[in-house]
Amino acid sequence: MSASANEALVLQAIEAIWNRGDLDAADALFAPVYLNHYGLITDLVSGPEAIKISAAIYRLAFPGLHVSVDEIRTVEGTVVVRWTASATLSRSSTTTTAQEVLTGITRSRIAAGKIIETWTEWDRVGVLRTLGIPTE
């Protein structure tokens, strides 16, 4: 596949799965051997099920989750996306809500028209703190 086709595949995954919550789209976009490196359930589950579980957890924790693509390019056959995720969270200790923003970079390796591996870098500790989960 061309670089532009690979980029379109990754954009489709972001829009369908992360933004619309269409978890079943993972079956068409991710290879049966897909591995998620550095994710919430890193290497515990493989294949499309890994992305379905990850997306479901994040969408539950962050209602209204929306991922915006800030930059996308193909570098040495790998699609690299710089992204910003946002969601409105209710604070459990108060009645207020807050707009939370997280930035990150995801590298996706694609073969035979499917995403087969991803590596994502983001502020994991910051997200856990936002959710009220102790990090020490």
Image (cartoon, rainbow, N blue to C red):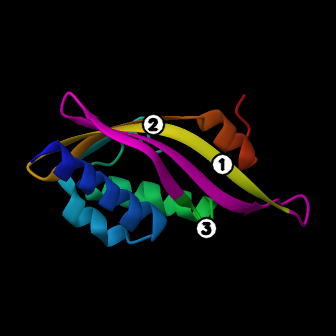
Q: Position of residue 65 (x, y in %)?
A: 57, 62
Residue 32, above or below 39: below
Q: Which mark is residue 64?
A: 3
Binning the other alpha carbons within 10 Å of mark 1 as few (below 14), some (14 to 19) or many (20 upward) gives: some
Residue 89, above or below 36: below
State the separation of the CA atoms marked 2 and 3.
20 Å
Q: Earlier in the sequence, mark 1 or mark 3?
A: 3
* Residue 35 occupies quadrant: top left
Helix, strand or loop status at disc 1: strand
Answer whether residue 64 is magenta in the image: no
Q: Which residue is mark 2?
A: 105
Which residue lies at the image location 54% right of the left edge and 61% below the top edge? 66
Helix, strand or loop status at disc 3: loop
* Side (left or right) of 7 relative to 54: left
Q: Earlier in the sequence, mark 2 or mark 3?
A: 3
Amino acid type shown at disc 2: Ile
Q: Which residue is mark 1?
A: 101
